[in-house]
Image (cartoon, coloured by chain):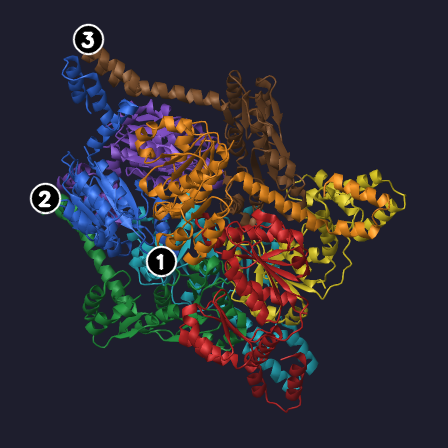
Chain colours: A yellow, B orange, C brown, D purple, E red, F blue, G cyan, H green
Amino acid sequence: MDERRLRRLLSRIAGGETTVEEAVAALKGLPYESVGGFANVDHHRTLRVGMPEVVFAEGKTAAQIAAIARKLAARGPLLVTRLAPGQAGPARRAVRGSRYDPVSRTLSRGRMELPTRGPVGVCCAGTSDIPACEEAAVTLEVMGVEAIRIYDVGVAGLHRLLARRADLERSVALVVAAGMEGALPSVVAGLVGRPVIGLPTSVGYGASLGGLAALLAMLNSCAPNVTVVNVDNGFGAGFAAGLMARR
Amino acid sequence: MDERRLRRLLSRIAGGETTVEEAVAALKGLPYESVGGFANVDHHRTLRVGMPEVVFAEGKTAAQIAAIARKLAARGPLLVTRLAPGQAGPARRAVRGSRYDPVSRTLSRGRMELPTRGPVGVCCAGTSDIPACEEAAVTLEVMGVEAIRIYDVGVAGLHRLLARRADLERSVALVVAAGMEGALPSVVAGLVGRPVIGLPTSVGYGASLGGLAALLAMLNSCAPNVTVVNVDNGFGAGFAAGLMARR
Amino acid sequence: MDERRLRRLLSRIAGGETTVEEAVAALKGLPYESVGGFANVDHHRTLRVGMPEVVFAEGKTAAQIAAIARKLAARGPLLVTRLAPGQAGPARRAVRGSRYDPVSRTLSRGRMELPTRGPVGVCCAGTSDIPACEEAAVTLEVMGVEAIRIYDVGVAGLHRLLARRADLERSVALVVAAGMEGALPSVVAGLVGRPVIGLPTSVGYGASLGGLAALLAMLNSCAPNVTVVNVDNGFGAGFAAGLMARR
Amino acid sequence: MDERRLRRLLSRIAGGETTVEEAVAALKGLPYESVGGFANVDHHRTLRVGMPEVVFAEGKTAAQIAAIARKLAARGPLLVTRLAPGQAGPARRAVRGSRYDPVSRTLSRGRMELPTRGPVGVCCAGTSDIPACEEAAVTLEVMGVEAIRIYDVGVAGLHRLLARRADLERSVALVVAAGMEGALPSVVAGLVGRPVIGLPTSVGYGASLGGLAALLAMLNSCAPNVTVVNVDNGFGAGFAAGLMARR
Amino acid sequence: MDERRLRRLLSRIAGGETTVEEAVAALKGLPYESVGGFANVDHHRTLRVGMPEVVFAEGKTAAQIAAIARKLAARGPLLVTRLAPGQAGPARRAVRGSRYDPVSRTLSRGRMELPTRGPVGVCCAGTSDIPACEEAAVTLEVMGVEAIRIYDVGVAGLHRLLARRADLERSVALVVAAGMEGALPSVVAGLVGRPVIGLPTSVGYGASLGGLAALLAMLNSCAPNVTVVNVDNGFGAGFAAGLMARR
Amino acid sequence: MDERRLRRLLSRIAGGETTVEEAVAALKGLPYESVGGFANVDHHRTLRVGMPEVVFAEGKTAAQIAAIARKLAARGPLLVTRLAPGQAGPARRAVRGSRYDPVSRTLSRGRMELPTRGPVGVCCAGTSDIPACEEAAVTLEVMGVEAIRIYDVGVAGLHRLLARRADLERSVALVVAAGMEGALPSVVAGLVGRPVIGLPTSVGYGASLGGLAALLAMLNSCAPNVTVVNVDNGFGAGFAAGLMARR
Amino acid sequence: MDERRLRRLLSRIAGGETTVEEAVAALKGLPYESVGGFANVDHHRTLRVGMPEVVFAEGKTAAQIAAIARKLAARGPLLVTRLAPGQAGPARRAVRGSRYDPVSRTLSRGRMELPTRGPVGVCCAGTSDIPACEEAAVTLEVMGVEAIRIYDVGVAGLHRLLARRADLERSVALVVAAGMEGALPSVVAGLVGRPVIGLPTSVGYGASLGGLAALLAMLNSCAPNVTVVNVDNGFGAGFAAGLMARR
Amino acid sequence: MDERRLRRLLSRIAGGETTVEEAVAALKGLPYESVGGFANVDHHRTLRVGMPEVVFAEGKTAAQIAAIARKLAARGPLLVTRLAPGQAGPARRAVRGSRYDPVSRTLSRGRMELPTRGPVGVCCAGTSDIPACEEAAVTLEVMGVEAIRIYDVGVAGLHRLLARRADLERSVALVVAAGMEGALPSVVAGLVGRPVIGLPTSVGYGASLGGLAALLAMLNSCAPNVTVVNVDNGFGAGFAAGLMARR
């Protein structure tokens, strides 16, 4: 319910085209009336952010996911995350034109059409980190932001990273994933003066503590332009980077 | 903005008493209106709870504490917690009639006059737990709730606890403090059918982990009527128990 | 052996009605007598609390559960928790009139008939927290306490919570479940002057540490009316809240 | 190879009944000659302790267990621990007269015939702790020590524990198992002046941290006669208690 | 050594202008050449970022700090962080026109003159979090970015936060500090579609674990636009937010 | 109040030498009557254990310690632990004949005269572990048990330990202290078939986690005759070992 | 591309046998040209280390592993680690002459031919640690270093370890694996003046914390010649030891 | 007692030159004989390692340190570590020619004269890590190994590290210190094919957990030539590296 629609409704009341009862019902039909204007703000936020609805599939049945996805896709771009291949079928069939990607485990359709300031780089050290990176990249793309994939650039072979310096530099923000010792965000952040989002992954074993070692490393980065998200939270990293790329 | 007020506004538009522009402005103003009403509710809450203001003294200077205390004491009962003896002087002098207690490290004056359902028992195992207990007891007293002190009733000498069964039973809720292994709340909760608030203390060393061992023990209590507060949080335990004792 | 009985015994010795040997025997028997009396007290507690027997099904076979459930149901209301759907059949058939609920994973029959002071609100942020909430709600209902379900009211969309303020306010105590960052209890506790029981859930991944992050957050709540139970302990939260709602 | 056998062997050499080569071979046949007398000491220890060989079955195949068990049973009493029901068959058949117990998950045959000072009490709070207790009890029995089972005596119902005081008092040492908050060892240790071995179990969930909460509680016991073993280590608890019961 | 330069070198060999030995030496020298170019890039980065030098004072003597500060201030804006009041004197006197702020514990002079997209909001729940916020705010100001201070807006009194909505909405990024349960970033991030940097503080005790509880809460935020920095790292939060505000 | 004294009191009542009121007062004057025979058991236990009173000095003032020590010393042997040199004076003067030992930080006087089965060995790896060992040794001596000190026998120089094998073997139980990696108890327990009490110390830094690394190592000992006490808990280790040495 | 090959290429240009275009293409065909000489260094390192490519199989499909293995085996010795038996078939068939070892879970073929200074000892306490040891031993063998297996030499039976002293002493470095309390590296390091690499294993349960207890113990070793790798990281331990054995 | 000596003893029995009693006594004496020989081995080790005695000063008085230092310095090179400036005087005066270094906090005199294979590089990221590095460097120098100091080469400014490549490459082993995120060892280990010893330091705050974050990062290094020592253990890192540099 944006201001334009509110104004139109009120004009119809003023003009007698709509009764007070109908208007009350219409306003009550919105999810938010009971808390007054406050809810409108929330609605505005959703439109502005350009990410109306995201479904976290883990813990839901394939049928539930399909039902939710169909409903959401009617209103705008769709993104379903953490969707296992074995559960994707019903939702993919329910939303015509949707695309399931088994690497990022996302189902998506459409993209926002909002102005951006430039692309976001998505980096990782090894192939095991690619699923988290792809979750971030798909999120960015649904938000209408270009994602530059900069993969296999681990700190134990710096030349591969240095070879991609041009791509690092044209990014307005960077998502940098790493498991194990989690050192890559510090190195990348030392190369470019852009916000870097550290994305720790659960890649590793033993003292990696399921990704906590990488998480701690990133939180202690000696480069001050690193902020961090939860382990394996590719969606969150992509979403935050996408907001930074908005004009 | 409840339904009644919304309906009235819409009727005024329909009747031409209000222009569309005025209505849009009024509805856009709503977030602030609802904030207004909201704050009132908060104000009501404060009155109803009967604990208008509590000062956590740690990290404030003696002069700051005195200034805040004087201001608050003008409006109702006063409670200052975590007030070291060396810092209590100015505040005590600033609030005529206030009382500083070096054991609980509280400064207080006055008490609420609200109806209660009965006293709250405050138990502990050893003398080292008494400061946390006294913080709870003083909090209860400022809330206008009687505190029954049941001290030195540790689990390694059950007879002392059993000797206080009558006091346990006439309590409408219990605060049970323990450091080290934190076993006392389970034992007390097995004796009486009342809500028991486990209050872990930092008493101990080594594997007590600064009170975390006792905290974990209480969270894992085999008695289902135990809920838990933070380590050494005597004020929180007393406050929650005081609410339970309210009519 | 209270003072009155002791005095009577000693008088009988003084009066020659009891020999010294008889008195020694009686007094030596005391530990067992006191155990006897003690057990009675425990029996009274059970009756007063109105929750005679609860079965924790995890780790028991379907046959064992059925046998215990039949025996307990003969004496009063029955509650079985943590009962997986695949194991519920025998117990459900063993107790005529019992009801199995797959969401809360409880089997129950009957309810206590004790006077209460009002309903208990049961809140949660997201759909994944509902099983823990329902365990609390069913526990409350078996205790004879009305449970008001206030679901899907997470802190990232405050308007949904504010819309349920009337329900929050008529509750005499609240169970507030949350996984992930565990912020909901603090927000709810800031809105109502009632005891709030924080119920952390294991919903989350990575740095949620299986619910410990939510648990820690609740223990550190800036609202002093929050006490906490173990992760996913819906039964404990419901039970403690139910006691608070007893008259 | 105890002193008596060594003396006999040397006498046979002196008497010409055994050649030097045969004696060297015999002594080399012992596992330890290569390190000289040192190994003999180890051998002596084994005989004195009366627990010649114990097999930890976890991580071995059923065939491997059967082979080891047959070999060991030829030399004296046998104890196999952590033996899952599905893997017990071959070993049970390989050792005639052996007995598999599915609760303690042990396979055993025979017992040591060494003098003891009295029985060992084995206590636990709930039925879920019984497997760990039974592992301790079976270990004691193979060591030739009587085990008094004192089960279902949790701290939330003290009368059940007090009713077993006579059994506690005739024990020369006690194994006390508990999961969840791990409070039982403290309470038992406060009742009897005997060494108490706290046996934390992994019974619990959430903040029980797989038994670590109980472990920490026991390490912080306010009763000084409590020592502790690893989580679920029924064998170690029984073995240490058995040594304490040796004359 | 880009392709163009390589081609020229090889051509010179082909043309006999360069001997093989000279070419080998040149190519072996390459790592140092590339280091040279690399360092220039780093220099560019510094200029572009607009934060040429920052001194972390902790662990340095007052004299060392003064010497470094004087040297850096000769080249551009200066920022010294974590500077205790007792150590600030020499550095303040060494840099004419510098300003020491005892709350943020910073010494600063000058500011960058780079175009920005708008102000950054800096929020916190309680007065104890203000030092970390001020460190962020001063950092922003030295970067030439306006900082909007939004203090004392804790989640247990939502109306205070809602009253500052206009300020939240005009911020292009937000730094949100919180100790204890660390809930504020989630609530703020639910209100505005902007990147939110969670800044956990060490405010709290017991189970706050020196700020780790707040840190974990923020990492588990249910709002996807939250990224996190280390405990009390106001400089890092301000710096990252300042980069986001750059045009 | 043993049976003999009880019988005498009752006889005096029967003989008219004592009034009922006097007898009630006498019985009430004992600390334990109100819980009947149960308290007597506790009293019996104290006598049998032979460690009537132990004072943990940490957290008490020198004056408090002196007052308690004087009172306890009137009844039997005295032991004060964790007594800093600067606080020992008043207590030492208050109890004539007491001895303060600055290494173990104990004040003691007298010893129990109960039959024992042999000495207890007290071992440690390095000189930094000696204070914890001495606390154990002094505790043993007050209990009337001989302590054999076996110091400086760390695992990185096995020959020193092997040279003390005779002493290890004549011990009926062993206290084995170690900080850092905590390996010594396993090695000792592999040499002798006696109960070994692992006593982790806080000696170390970094990953020793204040003694937790040693504690964990001992809990995971591959030797089954190791049980463990809290970090630096020399008193508990000595006390438990002393009980094992009792006849 | 070592110096010899570079020189030959340049000579061919000088001699007109190769055109500049061909040379540029050849140099571009190397993976590293884009970063100039820097990449060559990396290439040099690989040749010198003698471990050109190692595949970590976990998380890859059998087909992916086979494809990578075939490609790598064309260039030199091959090592695939963490390869489950069920996934080894395709890779084993793809690389003729390769050998799959189910204990170490490695697939290997060939070995480096570089001069070494002597063998590396690989020790462990129990049979459960053998898989980690074999991973280290196979790694050493592919590096062309002799591995001396010294198994079943746990600290609770020192004679077995002492019997292998000659083997310990002829090793130029040692890999010492241990789970549970992790004491073996300290004991071995006390016997020989060689670098010892502690290899903690995840063998154990409860307080072994998945190998972290052993890891902590090794980090706290009282022997200063112990360095440590991650839990179960047999490859890393073998690789580092192999480098130490290189001439 | 090797086989040759055993055979001779048995032959003497067979030949009547030794009685059975004498042989039993000889064989019973063996453990002590083997201890004798064992200790010699240890003695050999000390000589061979070339680091006869090192004093860890922490926890010792200045007078104790001086006494030990004087005694040790009489036998060979001396090294005292963790020696605070305020405590160094007496020891420095006690050992003529000794040198106290306040940065590394070591007192040393002399150096071993054993053949080495080359220098050891000692690297660190920032100035705060220099004390740990210097402790390693001084240890190397006392061992007679050249230490190449490579300081201030942190990962956020790679060019500084790359500029020191020649020094990295001529090292036979490397000690690489880092606090905060601990990334430097991985980067260095990717540049040179030499054993790298990661030396985590306690530099950092908050989520650095006193150096544990850096420690975890290093244990999870993606470069397999990294092994790790305890936090701030410069001596251990230097010592192990020194052994690697021995011929």
Q: Are marks 3 and 2 in contact (CB under 8 Å)?
A: no
Up-down relation of residue G89 to residue C111 (above or below): below
Q: Give the chain of mark 1.
A: F
Tell which subunit mark 2 falls on. H
Q: Residues within 10 Å of mark 2 (few under 14, many from 20)?
A: some
Q: Which mark is residue B172?
A: none
Residue C161 placement, left or right of A217 = right
Choose top left, top right, bottom left or bottom right for residue F128: bottom left
Task: State which mark lies toward you, 3 or 2.
Answer: 3
Secondary structure under tag 2 reads loop
State whether residue F155 appears in this view: yes
Task: Measuring from the top left, give residue C9's x and y in whole percent.
Answer: 25, 14
Amino acid under disc 2: Thr
Badge 3 element: loop
Give the quadrant of residue B15.
top right
Residue in front for this viewpoint, D204 or G187: D204
Q: Position of residue D141 (x, y in %)?
A: 31, 28
Instruction: Answer with left or right where residue H22 lies relative to residue A110.
Output: left
Q: Which residue is mark 1?
A: F205
Instruction: Tell me the residue that label 2 is attached to.
Output: H19
Tell me which amino acid carries mark 3.
Gly
On the image, which quarter does residue C96 sit in?
top right
Does H102 sit above or below residue A62?
Answer: below
Q: Are marks 1 and 2 on the same chain?
A: no
Q: Tell me the CA gap for discs 3 and 2.
A: 82 Å
